[in-house]
Amino acid sequence: MINKKTILGIERIDEFQSVFAKKRIGLITNPTGIASNFKSSIEILNEKTNLVALFSPEHGIRASIQAGEHLESYVDDETGIMVYSLYGATRRPSKEIMDKIDIMSIDIQDCGSRYYTFIYTMAYCMQACAEFDKEFVVFDRPNPINCEKVEGNILNTDKYRSFVGYYPIVQRHGMTMGELAKLFNEEYKINCKLTVIPMLNYERWMDFEDTQLPWVIPTPNLPTIATAYVYNATCIFEGTNVSEGRGTTTPFELIGAPWIKSERLAEELNSYNLKGVYFRPQYFTPTFSKYAKTLCGGVFVHITDRKTFEAVKTSWTMLYHIRTKYKDYFEINKPYTEGRPTLFHFEAGEDTIIENTIPLQEQLENLEIDSKNFLHISKKYYIYTVSYT
């Protein structure tokens, strides 16, 4: 096992100067785009390349905007460089914008989940690069919840393709941004000119703490590494009338609703004896989002062992139990656009889960099948050491 500090892709730019020489550079980033000495990737590229454009994903280039809020393009105060929004009127850069650059690059911290929109911002920009004959460069970063465990159901893209799930991957994909870029480019036929600048001293077993890198909050509701670990277990509830903890100091680490009795739900969920997790009774009052200023009963999801914790199995078990035991209260929220699938549909991504038409045990068995099938595909695009067979 490696004990050295991980060297990020952005920290290796001097080794790859030939890629950027005499090119106009665009960068997709947010506050997570930093070197280990806290110097921003914007500053690094502005010093070492001809940085001419910045691109902002969901939550903004400063990660100050709540989920779902659109933003417009503006001039960055620090550099005077134009910032183009990729979460406003459009999520794909236009030909007019792409004509201003030769290389589109990305340096941003993913959280290891299919639900996270940053990976699709990357995919859309890769598509634009393929269409307009530009290069795409990934400054690679760690998967904060390690790359060893792969789990989930494969998204049905024919019915549920969206900005929270665009390609047929599982929830916990077990890949870095660079590896995902290779998967998207080759397996799903984007076919852009792609360069991944890999990390050094990084292996698949590593949790984020093992990298010895600073953690920077990637989005307002993902404040800690613990949140990233539990995100794949509780994010499914954001499309329902069960609170996922937004509006509290521990979003996604707790769930609940005014009609839930905390002690009862905790006892019931603990009876499943799920690996690496304990459900503690928790009452909470969100300050915004669902049930703002209303007391909710629920559970705090404590991960007791990261290595054995199965986030998606935990997710489907919690979901199945609550929608079955609380069927008189549980609801799937309405779609954002009439006639379209709901957020719950897009995140669940598969009809037997959406409709709850098969027993829980069969749902979990299907998870195992999909996980193995995706692993068989994804392993072809690994950059870093595989410590299992």
Image (cartoon, rainbow, N blue to C red):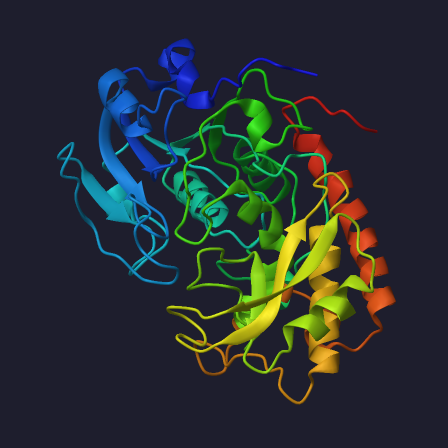
Above or below — where is 91 with respect to 36? below
Q: Is 194 in front, or is 55? A: 55
Above or below — where is 175 with respect to 56? above
Q: Which residue is drawn at 80% across and 55% down?
A: 274
* Residue placed furthest toward the top: 15
Left or right: 30, with 256 as reference point: left
Q: Which residue is drawn at 86% across and 59% down?
A: 365
Residue 134: which quarter of the image?
top left
Residue 292: which quarter of the image?
bottom left
Q: Residue at x 32, y 34 (%)?
A: 27
Residue 125: percent from left, percent from top: 40, 43
Q: Does residue 153 appear anywhere in the picture?
A: no
Q: Does residue 283 appear anywhere in the picture?
A: yes
Residue 180: percent from left, percent from top: 57, 38
Residue 204: percent from left, percent from top: 67, 28
Q: Is 170 in front, or is 144? A: 144
* Residue placed furthest toward the bottom: 328
Above or below — where is 206 with respect to 321? above
Left or right: 52, with 130 as reference point: left
Q: Is 57 in front, or is 98? A: 57
Q: Is 18 in front, or is 314? A: 314
Left or right: 106, with 235 as reference point: left
Image quadrant occupied by the C terminus: top right
Q: Residue at x 50, y 41 (%)?
A: 110
Residue 135: percent from left, percent from top: 40, 30
Total count of labels: 0
Image quadrant occupied by the N terminus: top right
